[in-house]
Image (spheres, coloured by chain):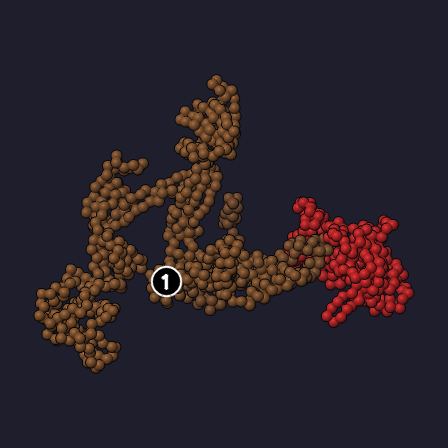
Chain colours: A red, B brown
Amino acid sequence: MARGTEPIIQIRNVHKRFHTLRGTVHALRGVSLDVMPGEVVVIVGPSGSGKSTLLRCINRLETIDSGSIVVDGIPLKGARNINKVRAEVGMVFQSFNLFPDRTALGNIVLAQRVVRKRKKAEAIAKAHDLLAKVGIPEKADAYPGQLSGGQQQRVAIARALAMDPKIMLFDEPTSALDPEMIKEVLDVMLALAKEGMTMVVVSHEMGFARAAADRAVFMDGGMIIEEGTPDVLFSNPSHERTKLFLSKIL
Amino acid sequence: MDERARTESIRSLPQGDPEEEQQPPGLYERLIAWLAGLPWWAIILGVVAVAVLYSMLTSEAYRRVIQALTDNPQTSTEDLFEVVQVVGEPTMIVGAYVGETQDSVTTVVDILLDKVIDRKEVTHTGFILAEDPASLTIRTESGLFTIPKDRLVEEKREPAPGGERITLTYVDRVTVSGILTKRTDKTYTVRTVNEVAETFDKARILSRTVIPCEQVTAANCVEGEYVTIERQGEIISGTLNTLSNTNISLILEDGSQREMRRSDVDRFDVPTLTVAVNARSANVPVVPGGEVRIAFVQGTDIMEALEELDSLEDVPVPLRYAEGQARVALVGYPTLDEALTATGAGEVNGLLYLDDGPERLAVQSWVEEHPDAGVVLPTPPRECQKGCQVSVKLKDDAITGRVAEETDDTIRIVTTEAEYLEIDRAKVLENRRMEPGVCALNNLRGCNAGIFLTLRVTFQAYALALLLGLIFGLMRVQTNPVLYAFSTLYVEVVRGIPLLVILLYAGFVVSPELRDNVGISLNDEQEAVIGLAFGYGAFIAEIFRAGIQSISRGQMEAARSLGMSYPQAMRYVVLPQAVRVVLPPLGNDFIAMLKDSALISVLALPDLLQLGRLYVSRTFRAFEGYNTVAILYLLMTLFLSMLVRIIERRTRLPH
C-alpha cells in the first residue's frame, strides 16, 4: 500500500449542531482526524455517536459549524465548486440509494455523462467493466427493483467508482443487508482496499476491519475516543467506553 | 418489416405434428377471454353504452345536434387555409453595360436568361421594384430593367463589343394571396379568385341562350356550356321578421334569415287585417259580463286574426274586452257579403277580415259601395308587421355563366370562375398563414367551434398549466424564502378563487388592462387558455411539490455525492421519478380541466356547451341537446381516463 506524506483528508476540530424543534443536538464536538492517501480507516461507535455525520461532512452533504475540513487540498468551507470535490469523493450509502427508474447500467452511466461529460460509448464501456469488477456483469439491464440487496449495494459501489474518485466513503454499507449478502459486498470492498483506494468506512464488520483497515477509530458522543490499529483497538482497548461498546457487539 | 413477416409465416406453417401447435390465441379468443374477465355490471354498462350510441347516431334529431356541436364539418373541402405567399427565385440577365450611377447600373441586354417558369412574373415584379432607389437599371430589347441591389445574387462583367457585358442574377418576388387548396411535396395550389355560383330550380327558367365559345374569355371553353338564362323571380316563403319601406326580411324554415330590397321584389303577400264594426255599437263599450260577437269569413285563420287584433295599438271599442269580463262568440259566415250584412244588421258587434291576396281590401270597397249598410271601419286596414307567414316573389332576372351542374330539377350556374395558381414550394420565400379555411374532415384546423374548441383550449391550457405547475412546484420545495413565499402565495390565492371568477377576471380585467396599458391584445380564446392555465397551475404545482417530496432524500444525496449540481440532480434523478408518481393525479386534473373548460362559454366562446345552449334555444329541444352535450363530454373523459391508465401501466417500473 503506497503512502503519501500529506494527508488527503484533514479534519480539524469540527463542530456540528443540528437544530430541531425539540432543541439542539451537538453531533460533533471537536473532531480531528487525518487520513493519508491509500489509507483505510474504519470508524466504529454506538448509534448517535456522530460517525455518519462525520462521513457526510467530508463530502459536505452536511455543513459544519466550526473547524475545518480539507479534502485533497481544497478546504470545504466556502468551496466554490463543491461539485468538483464531490466528484472526487465517492460515497456508498446504507440504503444504497440507487436510482430506481434506471437500469444498473443506467445508474453507472448517468453521472459519467452529466458530470464527467464522457461520450456515451465510453461511459457504457466503463460501466460494463465496473459491473464485471463487482461481480455482476449479467445484471447490466436489470432495474434496482429486480436486484437483491447485495447486488444493489455492489451496483452502488460501481456507480461511485465510475467517477474515478480518489476517496471512497462507506456509510454502514452492509447494515441493511441479509447476512448471506454481506460477504459479497465486503469482498468487493476488500479488493478495493487492496488496490490502494483511500477509504473511510463506518462499519461494525470486525472481520473486514481486521483484514483491510490500517486504522480503526472509536467514536462516542460526537468525539473520537480512541484510535489505533484494528488489532489493538478491538482486542486491547484502553478506554472504558470502548471496552463497554466492544463487549456489547462482540 | 418484410423480413419479419416472412419469418412469422414460416413459423406458423404447419410443422406436421398437430400436437406441436402452440399458436398464440387469435384476436377473437383474446376478446372473449377479456370479456369473460369483466364484472357483470361492466358488461351491462357496455351494452347500454353501445345501445345509446347506436340509437343516437341513427336518430335524425340527435344527428342534427351532433352536427351542430361539432361545428358542422363537411366531409371534404378545398378551402384549407388562407395564405399570403411571397414567391421568387434567382433570375439571370445578360446584357451590355451602358452606364452606372451611384444607385444603378444600365445595361443593354441581348439575351434574357430567366429560369422563372412564368416570364410574366419576372417582368412584372421587376417593374414594380424599379422605384427603389438602391437599384440596378438594365435595358433589354423590350426596355429598361431596374433590379434592386438588395435582390442581387451575382454580378459578372466582361468586356464585349459595344461596351461591357453584364450578367446579373437577382431574386424576383411576387406576392400571392388566396386560399390554399392543395399541398403536395413539391407544390402549393392557391385559389386566388373564388368561384361564385348560384343553384336554382329549373322550373324558373324562362329562356336559355347558349353563348358561343368565341365570345367567352375563359381558357377551356366547351361549346354549349356557357349560357344566359332568363328566369322567373324566386318565390320565398317564411316568417316575416321586419318590414320597412326599403327592406323585407324573412326567417326561412331552416332558421336562416333572408333580407331583400323592396325594389327587387315583384310582389309580396303580407296578410292585411281589416276591422269593421256595427255603426251603432261603434262607441258602446262592453258591459262586464256581457258578450262580444265577432264575425269572420269561414276558412280564414281567425286565431291569427285575433292575434293581429291584439297587436293593434288601439283596439276598436266594441271589440275591446278585458280577459274574463266578457264572453267572446266567434261567428263564421260562408261569404264576406253575408258577414258584412250581418255586421250592419247588428247580429255581431264587429268583423275581422284577414287576407294576403288581391282581395285584401275587399271590406273597404264593400263599405264604400254600401254607405248605408251600417258598417264602419274604425281603423284603416293594417299589414302584419312581424311573425306572420308570408311569401315574397322577386322580380325576373337574367344570369350568365357556365353550367356547372344540372339535374332534373335544378341547375347550377357559375358566374365567376375560380382561378388556381400552382406554386413551386422551393420558390416560396415566405408563407404567411392567415385564417384557417372551412371545417371539414380533411381540414380539422378549420373547425373552430364546439368539441374542437373545447379540445383545443383544454390541450393548450393544460400544456401551459403544466409549465406553470412545474415552475411553481419546484419553487415550493426550495429553501430560498423568497421563492417559497412567492409560490405559496400563488398557490393559496389561486386555489381560493373559483375558476369561473378567474376566467372572468382574465377576460374582463386582465385582458383589457393589457390592451390599454401594454398594447398586447388577446383574443377570447387566449384569454380562456390563460385563465384556465392560471387556475389549474396552482393545483398542478401542488401535485408536483408532493411528487418531488415523495422521492426520498437519499436520491438527491446520492446524486449530489456523485458530483451533480442541484439542477442536474433535479433534472436527471428526482424529476423523472417524481413524474412517474404524479402521472395519475396529473391525468385526473386533465380530465377535470376538460370538464371545467365548459366554463369558458362565459367569455362568449362557442365551445361544446355554448353551442349546445344555442341549439336548445333555437329548437327548444333541450332533451336531445343537453343529452348530447353530456354524452360527448363523457365520451371524451372516458377515452382520456383510459389513455391515462395505459400511460400509467407503461411507465410502471419492473420489480
Q: Nearer the viewer, residue A104 or B487?
A: B487
Residue lying furthest top: B161
- Decide if residue B118 is in sight here: no
Q: Quadrant of the C terminus of chain B?
A: bottom right
Examine the image and state in which quarter residue B477 appears.
Answer: bottom right
Q: Nearer the viewer, residue B313 or B330?
A: B313
The type of residue carrying mark 1 is Tyr
Q: Is residue B13 above or below residue B137?
A: below
Residue lying furthest bottom: B289
- Decide if residue A28 is in sight here: yes
Give x and y (percent) for residue A245: 84, 68
B648 relative to B560 in the view: left or right: left
Which residue is label 1 attached to? B615
Examine the image and state in which quarter residue B209 appears.
Answer: top left
What residue do we see at 46% from left, 30% from top? B146
Give x and y (percent) for residue B77: 38, 48
What residue do we see at 30% from left, 37% from top? B218
Q: Badge 1 sits on which subunit?
A: B
Give x and y (percent) for residue B454: 46, 59
Q: Residues within 10 Å of mark 1 (few under 14, many from 20)?
A: many
Give x and y (percent) for residue B364: 14, 65
What residue do we see at 23% from left, 56% from top? B392
